[in-house]
Image (spheres, coloured by chain):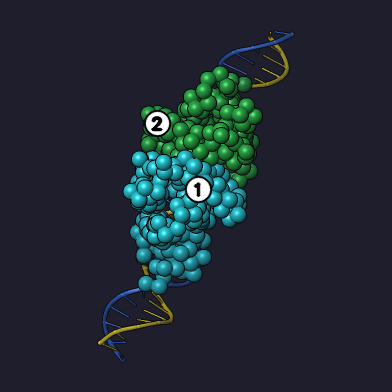
Chain colours: A cyan, B green, C yellow, D blue
Amino acid sequence: MRSRALVLDAATEHFVRHGYIGTNLDTLAADAGVSKRTVYNLFRSKDELFHAVIGRVTEIAEQFVSDHLQGEVGARPVDVELREFAVAHGRAVLAPRVIATRRLLIGEAERFPQLAADYYERVPGRVMAAIAERLARYHSAGLLNVPHPDLAADQFAFLVLGSGLDRALFDPSSLNDASTVARALAGADAFYRAYRAN
Amino acid sequence: MRSRALVLDAATEHFVRHGYIGTNLDTLAADAGVSKRTVYNLFRSKDELFHAVIGRVTEIAEQFVSDHLQGEVGARPVDVELREFAVAHGRAVLAPRVIATRRLLIGEAERFPQLAADYYERVPGRVMAAIAERLARYHSAGLLNVPHPDLAADQFAFLVLGSGLDRALFDPSSLNDASTVARALAGADAFYRAYRAN
DNA sequence: GCACTACTACACTCATCAGTGCACAAACCT
DNA sequence: AGGTTTGTGCACTGATGAGTGTAGTAGTGC
């Protein structure tokens, strides 16, 4: 049972870095410190191993993302809270492991369409729902004017990320906390101007 | 010389659909209606063929994108022009061929980092520059209040695309003109509320 | 006619890699 | 101790696929 974790860790690393086909099970096993035969004793095939890896990674991303998008609402001025939330959102989505997973799944979406769709629903979908819920609470409290929380959540999310996400998919080395934060703050401000009450 | 075009067309199709490794030169040649030897007479290697394909695709995308983001400024009310421009932008970026190219390059960014970076600069970079330039003109004319056109262009672009781009990368079948247009219009409106003059 | 270029058909090499079979070793219960 | 689970080492198969060599054909220009 210890081997299983070793294999999954090494497999995650390999798949994320080299994609599905680019991953070689001989070197993967060597990196895991385990014989290739053990890999095949634990997982029926490369395909099954890939599914296991993506399943675990999805859970982690799900967890990570919901941990970072909690927090009470209404304790401080709305614009201040929006800014804080925007920074949390930007950092959660642009975390290197999250970006790496996205790149992998986008690259393999042709081969594993179901996995990509599941991931989209469980991770970005959950983020969007968390944002919409928060915006709806502001709206009920009369703090913002957000008649369509789902649409506004979509706008908030991408206003805050801007080209940061897009660019990181092409070039992960472009990731940079300072610009993530700057974009998040500017995005929150623009959102507030567009959606403030009265 | 006719063969070259046949090979490039078939290669584009194959690479975009199956990725670099997933593309088999035997079947590619057969689809091009050409012998495999001819492919190797025209291109030194699969790698060189891939570069040629991406080079051509990048040019096409560049052209496509600039064709669709032209248009005079100031003839009609700003909010109306913003809406029209937003729709043009959304349609240009979410065109199936553009999305397919993105997915390919993101998937192969590990293997061909330079190609991905070049593409990013030449296509999305050009779009962003076109938007910033347009916003700067509105600002000079006193029609909008856009002190930082580059930042605002980033916001405009992703407010208009929203999750449409993101989702299409995971699942191209999610593309849908009606929702692209709806998101573009709502994005333009929110942008206008955030950046209108006075 | 002749020469040259573009292209073909096809058999071949060589490397890579998923997956298997098997005999054997170590670690763990009880 | 004795049995069971868990893992090892390694040689092997079989398929796939990039890239080559070569002899020969079709068209083009002169």
Three-letter residue code for mark 1: Ala
Q: Nearer the viewer, residue D13 or A98?
A: A98
User: Is A70 or B23 nearer to us in this picture?
Assistant: A70
**Which numbered disc, 2 or 1, marks the residue closer to the eye?**
1
Q: Are marks 2 and 1 on the same chain?
A: no
Q: Residues within 10 Å of mark 2 (few under 14, many from 20)?
A: some
Give the distance between the C-alpha atoms of the residues marked 2 and 1, in whole angstroms.
22 Å
Dot 2 and dot 1 residues touching (CB under 8 Å): no
**Circle 1: is it few (<14), some (14-19), or many (20+) Cα within 10 Å?**
many
Please give the count of numbered marks on the rendered protein: 2
**Residue drawn at the location 37% of the way across and 36% of the way down:** B174
Q: Residue at x 43, y 38 (%)?
A: B164
The correct choice, above or below, for B120 with respect to D3 in the image is: above
Q: Secondary structure at mark 1?
A: helix
Which image quarter is the N terminus of chain A in?
bottom left
Decide which of A77, B155 is in the foreground and name it.
A77
Q: Position of residue B167 (x, y in %)?
A: 42, 41
Q: On the image, numbered disc 2 is attached to which residue?
A: B182
Q: Position of residue A33 (x, y in %)?
A: 49, 69
Q: Report the front residue among A61 and A2.
A: A61
Indicate the secondary structure of the residue bearing disc 2: helix
Q: Is residue A10 visible?
A: yes
Image quadrant in which the C terminus of chain A is located: top left
Q: Which residue appears at 48% of the width and 67% of the height?
A: A32
* A69 w.r.t. C11: above or below: below
Three-letter amino acid code of the residue under disc 2: Ala
Chain at tag 2: B
Residue in view at x 59 percent, y 41 percent: B151
Residue with the mark numbered 1:
A188
